[in-house]
Amino acid sequence: MCRFCRDLRKKIQFYRKTLIETGINKGLQDPETLKNSQILDELIFRYQSKCK
């Protein structure tokens, strides 16, 4: 696996954990939770586009 894909996987894992934590602590409609969700979506999209 290339370095770019490894870095993306690490970022995805980080934002997935962050999203879960903010969702639990602040609620699913909190702006921070929604922002983390959008970032995670973008990272997953990039990973699927570039690393498969």
Image: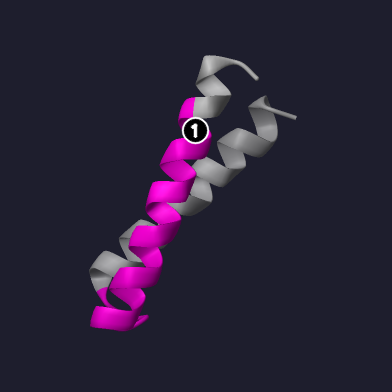
Please give the name of the residue rendered at 35% of the width and 76% of the height, measured from the top-left corner. Answer: 23
Residue 24 counted in the magenta span: yes
Please give the name of the residue rendered at 50% of the width and 45% of the height, measured from the top-left corner. Answer: 42
Which residues make up the magenta segment?
A: 7-30
Give above or below for 5 relative to 37. Answer: above
Please give the name of the residue rendered at 25% of the width and 80% of the height, measured from the top-left corner. Answer: 25
Q: Nearer the viewer, residue 9 or 48?
A: 9
**Would residue 39 appear left or right of 8 to someone viewing this image?**
left
Q: Which residue is mark 1?
A: 8
Q: Which x, y percent locates residue 36?
A: 35, 58
User: What amino acid type should be assigned to the residue bearing mark 1?
Assistant: Leu
Q: Which x, y percent locates residue 13?
A: 46, 48
> What quarter of the picture does the N terminus occupy?
top right
Q: Nearer the viewer, residue 14 or 36?
A: 14
Residue 39 can be seen in this image: no
Give above or below for 46 relative to 20. Answer: above
Q: Which x, y percent locates residue 39?
A: 40, 50
Taking the view exactly as shown, the residue that stands out farthest to the top is 2
- Display colour scheme: one colour
Give above or below for 30 relative to 52. Answer: below
Q: Main secondary structure of the magenta part?
A: helix
Q: Nearer the viewer, residue 12 or 30?
A: 12
